[in-house]
Image (tube, rainbow, N blue to C red):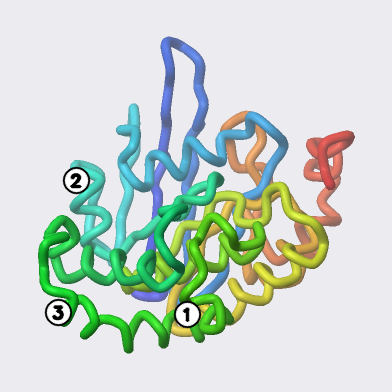
Amino acid sequence: MAEDYILETRNLVKEFKGFVAVNDVSLKVRRGHIHALIGPNGAGKTTVFNLLTKFLGPTRGSIHFNGKDITPEHSAQIARRGIVRSFQISAVFPHLTVLENVRIALQRKLGISFQFWRSERTLDALNGRALELLAQVGLESFAGMVAVELPYGRKRALEIATTLALEPELMLLDEPTQGMGHEDVDLVRDLIKKVSANRTVLMVEHNMGVVAGISDTITVLARGAVLAEGPYAEVSRNPLVVEAYMGSAH
Protein backbone atom coordinates (compact mmCIF):
# COMPACT_ATOMS: atom_id res chain seq x y z
CA MET A 1 0.00 0.00 0.00
CA ALA A 2 1.43 3.38 -1.05
CA GLU A 3 0.10 5.10 2.10
CA ASP A 4 2.39 2.87 4.20
CA TYR A 5 5.34 4.83 2.84
CA ILE A 6 5.93 8.38 4.02
CA LEU A 7 8.89 8.98 1.71
CA GLU A 8 9.81 7.50 -1.67
CA THR A 9 12.60 8.32 -4.06
CA ARG A 10 12.32 7.02 -7.59
CA ASN A 11 15.47 6.46 -9.67
CA LEU A 12 17.25 9.39 -7.99
CA VAL A 13 20.46 10.47 -9.75
CA LYS A 14 22.93 13.24 -8.88
CA GLU A 15 25.86 13.95 -11.16
CA PHE A 16 28.68 16.45 -10.57
CA LYS A 17 30.50 17.23 -13.83
CA GLY A 18 30.37 13.64 -15.00
CA PHE A 19 30.87 12.05 -11.54
CA VAL A 20 27.78 10.10 -10.46
CA ALA A 21 27.42 10.63 -6.69
CA VAL A 22 23.93 9.11 -6.45
CA ASN A 23 23.08 6.44 -8.99
CA ASP A 24 19.46 5.37 -9.55
CA VAL A 25 18.51 5.26 -5.85
CA SER A 26 14.93 4.18 -5.14
CA LEU A 27 14.17 4.35 -1.41
CA LYS A 28 10.91 3.52 0.35
CA VAL A 29 10.70 4.70 3.96
CA ARG A 30 7.82 3.13 5.87
CA ARG A 31 5.73 5.40 8.10
CA GLY A 32 6.57 5.07 11.80
CA HIS A 33 9.80 3.16 11.22
CA ILE A 34 13.48 3.92 11.87
CA HIS A 35 15.25 3.54 8.53
CA ALA A 36 19.06 3.66 8.41
CA LEU A 37 21.16 4.65 5.41
CA ILE A 38 24.63 3.14 5.71
CA GLY A 39 27.66 2.55 3.53
CA PRO A 40 31.41 3.13 3.31
CA ASN A 41 32.82 6.66 3.07
CA GLY A 42 31.97 8.23 -0.27
CA ALA A 43 28.93 5.99 -0.77
CA GLY A 44 26.61 8.95 -1.38
CA LYS A 45 24.69 8.97 1.93
CA THR A 46 25.00 12.69 2.70
CA THR A 47 24.32 13.57 -0.94
CA VAL A 48 21.02 11.67 -0.67
CA PHE A 49 20.15 13.73 2.44
CA ASN A 50 21.07 16.93 0.56
CA LEU A 51 18.73 15.90 -2.27
CA LEU A 52 15.88 15.09 0.13
CA THR A 53 16.14 18.51 1.80
CA LYS A 54 16.76 20.31 -1.50
CA PHE A 55 20.21 21.60 -0.56
CA LEU A 56 20.90 20.03 -3.96
CA GLY A 57 18.60 19.44 -6.91
CA PRO A 58 18.58 15.97 -8.49
CA THR A 59 19.93 15.47 -12.01
CA ARG A 60 17.14 12.97 -12.63
CA GLY A 61 14.48 11.11 -10.67
CA SER A 62 11.81 12.21 -8.21
CA ILE A 63 11.08 12.54 -4.48
CA HIS A 64 7.62 11.85 -3.05
CA PHE A 65 6.46 12.72 0.48
CA ASN A 66 3.05 11.54 1.69
CA GLY A 67 2.27 10.56 -1.89
CA LYS A 68 3.00 14.01 -3.33
CA ASP A 69 5.84 14.77 -5.75
CA ILE A 70 7.98 17.35 -3.92
CA THR A 71 10.92 17.28 -6.37
CA PRO A 72 10.45 20.90 -7.59
CA GLU A 73 10.06 22.37 -4.08
CA HIS A 74 12.62 24.50 -2.21
CA SER A 75 14.20 23.78 1.19
CA ALA A 76 11.79 26.03 3.10
CA GLN A 77 8.76 24.32 1.55
CA ILE A 78 10.20 20.90 2.38
CA ALA A 79 10.70 21.93 6.03
CA ARG A 80 7.14 23.29 6.24
CA ARG A 81 5.87 19.91 5.07
CA GLY A 82 7.43 18.37 8.18
CA ILE A 83 10.78 17.05 6.93
CA VAL A 84 13.33 18.33 9.46
CA ARG A 85 17.05 17.58 9.41
CA SER A 86 19.72 17.64 12.08
CA PHE A 87 23.34 17.94 10.98
CA GLN A 88 26.61 16.16 11.69
CA ILE A 89 27.88 19.24 13.53
CA SER A 90 25.86 20.22 16.58
CA ALA A 91 23.67 23.15 15.54
CA VAL A 92 22.70 24.86 18.78
CA PHE A 93 23.17 28.47 19.89
CA PRO A 94 26.17 28.00 22.22
CA HIS A 95 25.73 31.11 24.36
CA LEU A 96 22.00 30.77 25.00
CA THR A 97 20.60 28.53 27.71
CA VAL A 98 19.24 25.09 26.94
CA LEU A 99 15.69 26.40 27.49
CA GLU A 100 16.24 29.42 25.23
CA ASN A 101 17.50 27.17 22.42
CA VAL A 102 14.28 25.15 22.45
CA ARG A 103 12.20 28.31 22.81
CA ILE A 104 13.74 29.75 19.62
CA ALA A 105 12.78 26.57 17.75
CA LEU A 106 9.23 26.94 19.09
CA GLN A 107 9.20 30.59 17.94
CA ARG A 108 10.22 29.41 14.49
CA LYS A 109 7.22 27.07 14.43
CA LEU A 110 4.97 30.03 15.32
CA GLY A 111 6.60 32.21 12.65
CA ILE A 112 7.98 34.72 15.19
CA SER A 113 11.60 33.58 15.30
CA PHE A 114 13.06 36.97 14.37
CA GLN A 115 10.85 39.03 16.66
CA PHE A 116 13.42 39.23 19.43
CA TRP A 117 11.80 42.42 20.74
CA ARG A 118 8.68 40.55 21.79
CA SER A 119 7.90 40.91 25.48
CA GLU A 120 9.40 38.44 27.93
CA ARG A 121 5.85 37.52 28.92
CA THR A 122 5.03 36.41 25.36
CA LEU A 123 8.14 34.25 25.21
CA ASP A 124 7.52 32.85 28.70
CA ALA A 125 4.26 31.42 27.36
CA LEU A 126 6.46 28.99 25.38
CA ASN A 127 8.35 27.81 28.47
CA GLY A 128 5.86 25.08 29.39
CA ARG A 129 6.15 23.41 25.99
CA ALA A 130 9.94 23.93 25.95
CA LEU A 131 10.26 22.19 29.33
CA GLU A 132 8.07 19.30 28.10
CA LEU A 133 10.43 18.81 25.16
CA LEU A 134 13.47 18.96 27.43
CA ALA A 135 11.88 16.32 29.65
CA GLN A 136 11.42 14.08 26.59
CA VAL A 137 15.17 14.13 25.95
CA GLY A 138 16.24 14.02 29.61
CA LEU A 139 17.45 17.62 29.76
CA GLU A 140 14.93 19.24 32.13
CA SER A 141 17.54 19.56 34.88
CA PHE A 142 19.88 21.33 32.39
CA ALA A 143 17.30 23.99 31.36
CA GLY A 144 19.22 26.94 32.85
CA MET A 145 22.66 25.82 31.66
CA VAL A 146 24.39 27.67 28.82
CA ALA A 147 24.46 25.28 25.85
CA VAL A 148 28.24 25.55 25.33
CA GLU A 149 28.77 23.98 28.78
CA LEU A 150 26.78 20.83 27.98
CA PRO A 151 28.66 17.54 27.55
CA TYR A 152 28.82 16.45 23.89
CA GLY A 153 26.11 13.79 24.06
CA ARG A 154 23.76 16.21 25.83
CA LYS A 155 24.36 18.77 23.07
CA ARG A 156 23.05 16.22 20.57
CA ALA A 157 20.07 15.62 22.88
CA LEU A 158 19.41 19.38 22.83
CA GLU A 159 19.63 19.39 19.05
CA ILE A 160 17.04 16.60 18.93
CA ALA A 161 14.80 18.61 21.30
CA THR A 162 15.01 21.66 18.99
CA THR A 163 14.21 19.37 16.03
CA LEU A 164 11.18 18.00 17.92
CA ALA A 165 10.03 21.57 18.60
CA LEU A 166 9.40 21.93 14.87
CA GLU A 167 6.98 18.96 15.08
CA PRO A 168 8.59 16.91 12.31
CA GLU A 169 6.68 14.15 10.62
CA LEU A 170 9.97 12.84 9.25
CA MET A 171 13.25 13.39 11.15
CA LEU A 172 16.47 13.16 9.13
CA LEU A 173 19.41 12.51 11.44
CA ASP A 174 22.85 12.92 9.91
CA GLU A 175 25.50 10.92 11.83
CA PRO A 176 23.83 11.50 15.25
CA THR A 177 26.55 9.63 17.21
CA GLN A 178 29.62 10.83 15.31
CA GLY A 179 32.66 11.47 17.54
CA MET A 180 31.04 10.13 20.71
CA GLY A 181 32.30 7.83 23.44
CA HIS A 182 30.31 4.71 24.43
CA GLU A 183 28.27 6.42 27.16
CA ASP A 184 27.11 9.24 24.88
CA VAL A 185 26.41 6.79 22.01
CA ASP A 186 24.13 4.76 24.32
CA LEU A 187 22.37 7.94 25.48
CA VAL A 188 21.69 9.17 21.94
CA ARG A 189 20.73 5.72 20.61
CA ASP A 190 18.14 5.30 23.39
CA LEU A 191 16.92 8.84 22.76
CA ILE A 192 16.38 8.23 19.03
CA LYS A 193 14.42 5.08 19.88
CA LYS A 194 12.29 7.03 22.36
CA VAL A 195 11.51 10.04 20.14
CA SER A 196 10.74 7.82 17.14
CA ALA A 197 7.37 6.97 18.71
CA ASN A 198 4.62 8.43 16.46
CA ARG A 199 7.09 9.69 13.87
CA THR A 200 9.44 8.41 11.20
CA VAL A 201 13.24 8.60 11.39
CA LEU A 202 15.66 8.32 8.47
CA MET A 203 19.26 8.38 9.64
CA VAL A 204 22.75 8.21 8.22
CA GLU A 205 24.91 6.42 10.78
CA HIS A 206 28.36 4.81 10.83
CA ASN A 207 28.05 3.03 14.16
CA MET A 208 26.81 -0.47 13.39
CA GLY A 209 25.88 -1.10 17.03
CA VAL A 210 23.43 1.82 16.88
CA VAL A 211 22.05 0.71 13.50
CA ALA A 212 21.64 -2.91 14.64
CA GLY A 213 19.93 -1.92 17.88
CA ILE A 214 17.19 0.42 16.65
CA SER A 215 16.68 0.21 12.86
CA ASP A 216 13.66 -1.49 11.32
CA THR A 217 15.11 -1.30 7.80
CA ILE A 218 18.64 -0.67 6.53
CA THR A 219 19.60 0.50 3.05
CA VAL A 220 23.26 0.00 2.14
CA LEU A 221 24.78 2.36 -0.42
CA ALA A 222 28.07 1.78 -2.24
CA ARG A 223 29.45 4.05 -4.97
CA GLY A 224 26.18 5.94 -5.02
CA ALA A 225 23.94 2.92 -5.69
CA VAL A 226 21.79 0.69 -3.47
CA LEU A 227 23.76 -2.46 -2.68
CA ALA A 228 21.30 -4.16 -0.32
CA GLU A 229 18.22 -3.47 1.79
CA GLY A 230 16.40 -5.22 4.61
CA PRO A 231 16.60 -5.84 8.38
CA TYR A 232 20.04 -5.81 10.03
CA ALA A 233 20.27 -9.61 10.43
CA GLU A 234 19.77 -10.08 6.71
CA VAL A 235 21.88 -7.16 5.46
CA SER A 236 24.84 -7.91 7.75
CA ARG A 237 25.15 -11.42 6.26
CA ASN A 238 25.03 -10.23 2.65
CA PRO A 239 28.42 -11.04 1.02
CA LEU A 240 28.29 -7.87 -1.11
CA VAL A 241 27.84 -5.75 2.03
CA VAL A 242 30.67 -7.54 3.85
CA GLU A 243 32.93 -6.94 0.87
CA ALA A 244 32.00 -3.24 0.59
CA TYR A 245 32.73 -2.75 4.28
CA MET A 246 36.06 -4.57 4.47
CA GLY A 247 38.35 -2.21 6.34
CA SER A 248 35.76 0.55 6.73
CA ALA A 249 33.11 -0.82 9.10
CA HIS A 250 33.24 0.02 12.80
Q: Residues within 10 Å of mark 2 (few under 14, many from 20)?
A: few
Q: Spatial distance from mark 1 to mark 2, Cα to Cα?
A: 32 Å
Q: Residues within 10 Å of mark 1 (few under 14, many from 20)?
A: many
The residue lying at 63 percent from left, 34 percent from top is 43
- In primary-sequence order, the first of circles 3 and 1 is 3
Residue 212 in sight from this viewpoint = yes
**Type of amino acid at the residue the image marks with label 2:** Glu
**Type of amino acid at the residue the image marks with label 3:** Thr
User: In screen coordinates, is 216 left or right of 3?
Assistant: right
The vertical placement of 32 against 222, above or below, is: below
Q: Which residue is mark 1?
A: 134
Residue 238 at what x, y percent from top left?
82, 51
The residue lying at 19 percent from left, 42 percent from top is 72
Q: Secondary structure at mark 2?
A: loop
Q: Spatial distance from mark 3 to mark 1, Cα to Cα?
A: 19 Å
Q: Which mark is residue 73?
A: 2
Q: Which residue is mark 3?
A: 122
Q: Spatial distance from mark 3 to mark 2, Cα to Cα?
A: 33 Å
- In primary-sequence order, the first of circles 3 and 2 is 2
> Given this view, does label 1 or label 2 mark the residue nearer the observer?
1
